[in-house]
Image (cartoon, rainbow, N blue to C red):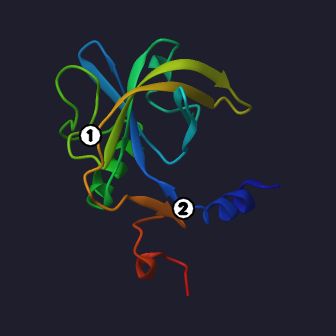
Amino acid sequence: MDVDTFRELLSHWAATVGIIAVRDDDRVYGTTITSFTPVATDPPLVLVSLGPHAQVLPFLTEGTHYAINLLHESQADLAHVYADSFPVGPSPFPDTGTPTIEGALTALSCVVTGVVTVEGGGRLVLGRVTEGTPPGGRRPLLWYRRASTTLAADDLPGLD
């Protein structure tokens, strides 16, 4: 299957937008994601698929602590900033500790338990969730048909 056809097919899959972030000394590296999947509840495990050029990749090794910040509908601008290879602007992360975003829909603190390199150079990062923040009562930011949206049915692009 060619890349354009595959992308068009996948554009019909709605996914929650998030930012995976890892702290290296005093600096936080973050990358916008839509490929987040819960794997198990006992123990709590999650999986993130990252492209070969994701800014966080060099720092996600076994035993590393990181955060998955799931964004709410008002955080589309933040998602766009961290979709860039070199994000510019004020940091939404705390000065110390796990790089969770205050005000995110929810955030999961995790530790890497495995990394698998896939064809094309991307990586699958498996993590054990150690903590989480309760959802803030807002609607999630979704990526659907190559656009940011939310759950309201009349806001979803491409639906009759």
What is the spatial separation of the Cα atoms under label 1 and label 2, in whole angstroms?
27 Å
For the N terminus, which image quadrant? bottom right
Q: Residue at x 27, y 20 (%)?
A: 27
State the image quarter where residue 116 is shown: top right
Q: Amino acid at mark 2?
A: Ala
Left of 22 or right of it: where is 6?
right
Q: Residue at the spot x=29%, y=43% of the render?
A: 134
Q: Position of residue 29 (x, y in %)?
A: 35, 27
Q: Is residue 50 visible?
A: no
Residue 153, x across and y down, in percent:
45, 78
Give SS at disc 2: loop
Residue at the spot of label 2: 14
Mark 1 surroundings within 10 Å by alpha-carbon count, few (fewer than 14), some (14 through 19), many (20 or more): few
Q: Which mark is residue 88?
A: 1
Of 84 and 110, nearer the camera is 110
Discs 1/2, front: 2
Q: Which residue: 43% across, 15% down?
A: 64
Image quarter of residue 138:
bottom left
Residue 121 lies left or right of residue 154; in this view the side is right
Q: Is residue 116 left or right of residue 57?
A: right
Furthest toward the bottom, the residue is 160
Name the residue: 21% across, 38% down: 92
Task: Tell how many labels.
Answer: 2
Q: Quadrant of the C terminus?
A: bottom right
